[in-house]
Amino acid sequence: MSKHSLIPGAVFPAFDLPTIDHGTVTIGAPAKEWELLIVYRGKHCPLCRRYIDTLHELLPHFREREVRVIAISADSEEKAVAFTREGGYHQLVVGYELSIEQMHRLGLYISEPRSPEETDRPFAEPALFLIRPDRRIQAIEVSNAPFLRPDLGLVLNGIRFVQDNDYPIRGRFEAYPL
């Protein structure tokens, strides 16, 4: 993991990525809504496909809570387009070409392909960031393995609770002054 890991309550570092059928998206830009950023490994990962399938099914529920959902990977445009079309993710904003520098800024674990058949470049392991409208990070989940990801139904219920109860940002013990 990068020495630049993000901490809860910190302002999310805004950056731009190209998107499938949506031009460019600025992640972490000032907004009136919450943002759920899902980092997935790429087209080569069958567990990512299942996770993004579930995410796509839950999109209407996230929208009801005024949460903008974005899924990103280091995939090339060609692979990201294929992944999106094969999955039928017409409702989901999918960003691609996440750079190694951006991965480091987000504190992600980065893996090299096991073979050229897997993929053609280093890729980020899964992560999830819940970003408040004021751009501070409410919740972070960073994994080093494809099988360790938060249940999206629990994430949705957690967002409901946080929003309805003005639940504070957790994990900010005084060791992490802002």
Image (spheres, helix red, strand yellow):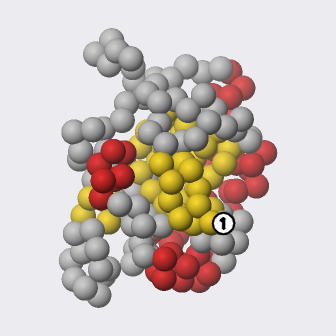
At 22% from the left and 39% from the top, the residue drawn is: 3
Q: Is residue 72 left or right of residue 144?
A: right
Could you tell me if residue 154 is visible in this image? no
Toward the viewer: 3 or 139?
Answer: 3
Give the x, y percent position of residue 72. 49, 61
Could you tell me if residue 168 is visible in this image? yes
At 42% from the left and 72% from the top, the residue drawn is: 75
Toward the viewer: 28 or 65?
Answer: 28
**Amino acid type indicated by mark 1:** His
Toward the viewer: 165 or 120?
Answer: 120
In the rendered view, tell whether residue 28 sits above or below residue 112: above
- Quadrant of the image occupied by residue 114: bottom left
- SS at mark 1 in the image: loop
Q: Is residue 63 left or right of residue 124?
A: right
Q: Which residue is mark 1?
A: 22
- Quadrant of the image occupied by residue 94: bottom right
At 66% from the left and 77% from the top, the residue drawn is: 88
Give the x, y percent position of residue 23. 62, 66
- Quadrant of the image occupied by residue 76: bottom left
Give the x, y percent position of residue 92. 65, 63
